[in-house]
Amino acid sequence: MTRVPVLMYHSVAGQASARFRPWVVHPRRFAAHMEHLSRHGYRSLTLSQLEDHLRPGGPPMPDRPVVITFDDGFADFHSTALPVLEAHHLMSTLYVATGYLGGTARWLAREREQGRPMLHPEQLHDVADRGVEIGAHSHTHPRLDELSATEARAEIRRSKDVLEQELQRPVATFAYPHGYYSRRVRDQVIEAGYTSSTAVRHAMSSTEDDVFARARLMVLADTSTEELERLLRGDGVPQAPFRPRPRTALWRTARRTRRALTPARRGPRAA
């Protein structure tokens, strides 16, 4: 079994609200992270490249593989993160919530980040043309496992359709918003034609991980370079595949039940 760290970033910026700050890595820290990967010989892959290496008959896995992913599609990926990635010749996968392209992160109102700029379509084209893999992250960033089957299917398929129409290229990979999914949601991702998807789970992925719920490691604002290296080694985190703890399974059931019993609220929900 080969262990593969799949890193999950969100925003790379110098400022953030108190509630959203844990998800925003300062540009200097992000640059230090990428320099560490490069200096220590990590070989970056896109998510789809990883799956190519893992399929029967695929190319051999490189030494020290790592997958660098970004969720949401914030404009600072284009202005701040991408130049650093390119300086170190690092590949990445960017998951985009398509309903906010050209606008702001309106689903983050609870975090007081509803004004955070998102990628414009022109920037999205530039990012894709520069070798970043573009994946889908739903259309409006809901908790898919709390939606009806019809609503979830529309979110999953619309994000793929929007990106493929905009970029005129296939979109193969999907990331569950908030990391939440269920067996039904996973099946809908497969039915929509994706070939892989990522969850969160804060765990080391592996060659035996679920291709439609691949584990990722959360990189947060306070993740030092030393802590990043511990994550890359898998120190102190579980390794997929693994069964969720009973408490986690009970919490998921309670959350979905509570949502089903709560009258629908208008407007986007925060991450």
Image: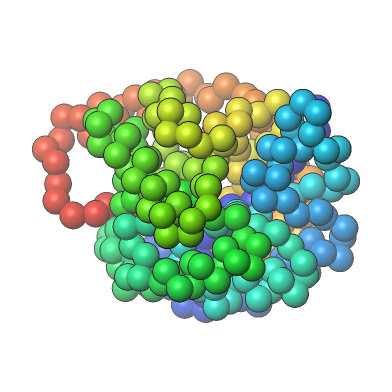
Residue 94 sits above or below residue 115 on the image: above
Q: Is residue 182 left or right of residue 205?
A: left
Q: Residue at x 67, y 50 (%)?
A: 46
Residue farthest to the left? 263
In the displayed structure, would residue 164 be above or below residue 37?
Answer: above
The answer to whether residue 225 is seen in the rendering is no
Q: Can residue 164 be spotted in the picture?
A: yes
Residue drawn at x 54%, y 43% as measured from the top left: 173
Determine the residue positioned at 53% across, 24% down.
Answer: 245
Figure quadrant of the N terminus:
top right
Residue closest to the eye, 57 or 71: 57
Q: Residue farthest to the front?
A: 168
Image location (x, y in percent) of residue 113: 34, 68
**Colour scheme in use:** rainbow
Given residues 188 and 3, the one toward you in this image is 188
Image quadrant in which you'd find residue 186: top left
Residue at point 68%, 37% (across, down): 51
Where in the figure is residue 205, as x and y percent of width and height? 68, 36
**Can you tell which quarter of the image residue 180 is in?**
top left
